[in-house]
Amino acid sequence: MAKYLLLKHYRGAPAPVNDVPMDQWTQEEISAHVRYMNDFAARLEETGEFVDSQALAPEGAWIRYDGEGRPPVTDGPFAETKDLIAGWMVIDVDSHERAIELAGELSAAPGAGGKPIHEWLEVRPFLTAPPTITE
Amino acid sequence: MDEALLRSLTPSVLAILVRRGADFAAAEDAVQDALVEAVRVWPTDSPRDPKGWLVTVAWRKFLDAARADAARRRREGLFDEEPAPGPVPAVDDTLWLYFLCAHPSLTPSSAVALTLRAVGGLTTRQIARAYLVPEATMAQRISRAKRTVSGVRFDRPGDVATVLRVLYLVFNEGYSGDVDLAAEAIRLTRRLAAAVDHPEVAGLLALMLLHHARRAARTAPDGGLVPLAEQDRGRWDTNLIAEGVEILQAALAHDRLGEFQAQAAIAALHADAPTAEETDWVQIVEWYDELVRLTDSPVVRLNRAVAVGEADGPRAGLAALAELDGTLPRHTAVAAYLHERDGDVATAARLYAEAARKAPNLAERDHLTRRAARLNAHRRHPG
């Protein structure tokens, strides 16, 4: 088993094929999209491959240490930051191929006109603990 | 096995152990161990006297742990720490537990966790699942909370407001999992109301019942939020509403108004309206004025602006909104709504989309996106 992170971006991913923002969809299209996402997660729970799914607020801040006894430095949000993560799903699957297959399915969620969004998702394998048997 | 019975016995079993001289932290651990044992054993071998069984098992667990601890201390050459005599319960059997678990020295999240475990009888695993954190994290949070309150003495009654704040949090910010935290908060508040004659305790109980009554109508089949005005009022639980209103009226008769009674009064006025159009917004605004006086909270002022928009028209609502800080959470959503009521569809759609980007949770984000989408569709195809 290996864990993979499927990352969804607010910003920084290549443009999807079906690039109409959600506030321009019909009510039925929004419902169909939400249903697809819920069904996808439910199906992965059934197959035992679902680990976690979370969404992030679009706005945050950059923080760094500023030395002993001083408050941390706060900066941002930076409008020019190219990459902005929207959320993720963590899956635990048997193979890299399976991770790719599932990411493809998730990217097919319907959007405007009921057609797949073809959204670009970033797939990143987790670094694992070292195996017990190494020789 | 009757889990509700098991849970309802928890605080009195804990109180008995403490009265026998166990310190709170150790007694609480022992009761938790006994609960876990009960969950394992009772389904096949149900005791005739559940409370007696729990006391016996919990006391044995306590003694085992104390002996193991003493042995460890002997091995390590430590003799200085004899367990201090525990707090002596005052009049009520378990009331002091509520105060201890909501002690002002605890952070809100710690107080919530400790209350659910020691008073509510939930297991650490259940609480962890309900708040979406790992079980080990929740176990640590609870044991740190117990250390924090270990020196607290109960020679005088605590401030009931601290307990109400914790119960309010459990009701309002319970997320998910196999435990119904809203129902649990109601159960604990009911017990508190039975033990303490205080109009704000009754006010909070009424508030919870009136909101719980709407629960079935609050969510669409696809999980989306249904706003109050669009809810199917036929799905509201009229028994809960009747009970909430009765409790509220008795509380208000004390003539000691507090924020929970005022909030419950607003909920009762909504519950009283057969349709959204028949809502008595003028009276609701008056209650918001009381709430502003009682709490001076910007969130209350924001809700008041919505009510003013209904009572005196959207322009009046926008005027009330203009006096508030624009960075308040949900300020943009309220502005969008009032502009929509005012017929300014373009501004409303733009503000709904902006509010969706700032939404603090997914349900609200989806809801606001839908409002924007609906108005945009209307602009494309008017009529």
Image (cartoon, rainbow, N blue to C red):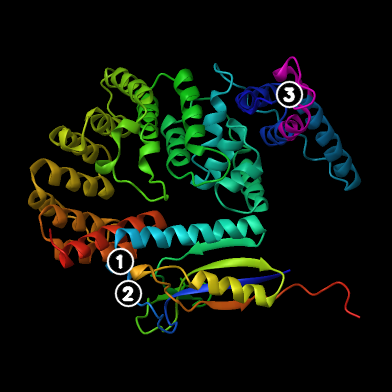
Residue A20: which numbered mark, if any? 2
Above-or-below relation of B360 to B105: below
Residue in the foreground of this view, choosing between B73 and B12: B12
Q: CA distance from mark 2 to mark 1?
A: 8 Å
Q: Residues within 10 Å of mark 2 (few under 14, many from 20)?
A: few
Task: Tell me the residue that label 3 is attached to.
Answer: B54
**Residue plotted at (68% across, 52% down):** B136
Give percent across and percent down for residue B314.
Answer: 11, 50
Q: What is the span of residues highlighted in magenta in the rendered image?
A: B33-56
- Comparing labels 2 and 3, the label whose residue is closer to the camera: 2
Query: Residue B9: horizontal and vertical position, in percent?
Result: 64, 23
Query: Does the segment drawn in magenta span residue B191?
Result: no
Q: Residue visible at 48% across and 61% down?
A: A37
In the structure shown, which secondary structural element does the residue marked by tag 3 occupy? helix
Please state if A101 lies on the left or on the right of A2 as rendered.
Answer: left
* B58 and B245: which is toward the camera: B245
B363 shown above or below A17: above
Three-letter code for the amino acid on which mark 3 is drawn: Leu
Q: Chain of mark 1?
A: A
In the orientation shown, which residue stands out farthest toward the front? A114
- Residue B229 position within the rendered picture, expressed as x and y whole percent measured from the top left: 24, 42
Q: Chain of mark 2?
A: A
Q: Residue at x 54, y 24 (%)?
A: B95
Amino acid on which disc 1 is placed: Trp
User: Cβ–Cβ below 8 Å for labels 2 and 3?
Assistant: no
Q: Which residue is mark 1?
A: A25
Crowd rating for badge 1 (residues with CA inside 10 Å; few <14, some 14–19, many 20+): many
Q: Are marks 1 and 3 on the same chain?
A: no
Residue A84 lies in quadrant: bottom left
